Amino acid sequence: MAEPLKTPRELFGDKSRIKSRSFGKRNDGVVFNASGVVQVAPERFVFIDNHEPTAVFELTLDPDNDELKQIRRRDLVGVTERQLGDPEGLTRVDTDGRTYLVATSSLSVSASRVNDGLVRIRYGDSGDLRAEPMAGFRSWLLAHEPTLAAAAASEPDDGGVNIEGVAWDPGARALLFGVRGPAEPGQVTIVEVPAAASGLWSTAAGTAAWTTAALGTPVTRTLRVPHSAALQGIRDISYDERSGQFLILLGKSLSRKAEPFALCTWTRGAEALRVTGARFDESMKPEGCTAFYRDGKRRILIVDDRGGYAVTGG
C-alpha cells in the first residue's frame, strides 16, 4: 500500500534551522540579491546577483569561523543587461587548464520584458572577466521543450517559465537546468542540455563558438519529492564531483504560496530526490548552494537573496 502524502509542515518539519549571516556589505548601497554560487579556490567563492547582469561577486571566508572576509566585484566584459536578463544560475566548468563560469537567465517574462541569456565567462584571479552571451538561447530551448514552450508567454506567478539554477556534469558533459516553474505538486523538473561539441571548452582545438549550434538535444527529467504534495520548484542545483551527488534547493514555485525551502540531494539514475534534514529559518530565502571540503569534511555554502549566507555541514 502506498504511503500517504504528507503536508509540507509534516514533511519538512520544525527541526534545528539554518540561519543566515548578513553579508554586512551592499552592492552600491543595495542589499545583495545572491543566487547561484560556485567555489573557485579554497575558501573563495563566486556568486551571481539577481539584479546585476554585468558583474559577479567573489566572497572569501575565514576557515576558522566562517566569517566573511571580503566581497569583491568582478565586472563582466562583453555582456549587456539585455543579454543576461534576470540572472539566476551559475556553474563552473574546468577543462584543459582553464576555468569557465556559466551564468543563466531565468528565461522568464515580466511585463513587456523577455529575459534571455546563457553566458560563458572566462574566469581568472584578477581583473575584469571576459563574457560571451549565447544569442537566442531562450528561443532554442523553447523550440526543443514543448512543456516550457506552452508556458513561455506567462509570467512566473502565472505558471510561466522560470529557470533558477544550472549545474555542469563533467561526466555527462552536459548543463543541467533547474526549473522553478512551471511546476506540479510533489515533483520537480531538470532539463539536461548536452554541451560536448568539439572545441567548446578545449583550447587544443581552439575554443568553439558559443552558439546554440554547439548544444545537443535537451532531455527532460521529472523527479519525485518523496511523500510531498507541495508545489515546489528548483531554486538552485549544483554538482559535487567528489560525492557524485547533485545538491538541489527547493522552494515555492509561485511567490504567493507558502511552500517551504528544502535542501535535497540527487544521484543520476534515481527517480526521486532525497530530502535532507536541513531546515531554514523563516527569515532566510536560500537561492544558491555549493559543496566544498575543509579538512576532508564536506561543507555546504548557501547564499540568501536577502543579503546573507550560511555554512552548514554536508
Image (spheres, rainbow, N blue to C red):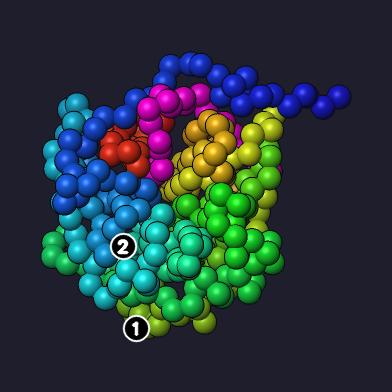
**Quadrant in the picture for residue 78:** bottom left
Q: Which of these two is toward me, 293 or 8?
A: 8
Q: Is residue 251 visible?
A: yes
**Quadrant in the picture for residue 99:** bottom left
Q: Is residue 236 left or right of residue 259?
A: left
Where is 31 relative to 139, above or below? above
Spot occupied by residue 129 in the image (x, y as percentages of width and height): 22, 67
Q: Which of these two is toward me, 37 or 79?
A: 79
Q: Residue at x 17, y 47 (%)?
A: 29
Spot occupied by residue 76 in the image (x, y as percentages of width and height): 24, 67
Q: Residues within 10 Å of mark 1 (few under 14, many from 20)?
A: few
Q: Which of these two is toward me, 305 or 130?
A: 305
Q: Residues within 10 Å of mark 2 (few under 14, many from 20)?
A: many
Dot 1 falls on a residue whose secondary structure is loop
The residue where tag 2 is placed is 53
Q: Residue furthest front?
A: 111
State which region is magenta.
270-290
Type of the residue with mark 1: Gly
Q: CA distance from mark 1 to mark 2?
A: 27 Å
For the residues bearing labels 1 and 2, Cβ distance under 8 angstroms: no
Q: Residue at x 55, y 19 (%)?
A: 13
First in sequence: mark 1 or mark 2?
Answer: 2
Spot occupied by residue 52 in the image (x, y as percentages of width and height): 29, 58
Circle count = 2
Where is 190 relative to 193, above or below? above
- On whether residue 102 falls in the magenta region, the answer is no
**Quadrant in the picture for residue 128:** bottom left
Where is 120 relative to 256, above or below? below
Where does the C terminus fall, quadrant-wise?
top left
The residue where tag 1 is placed is 206
- On whether residue 281 falls in the magenta region, the answer is yes
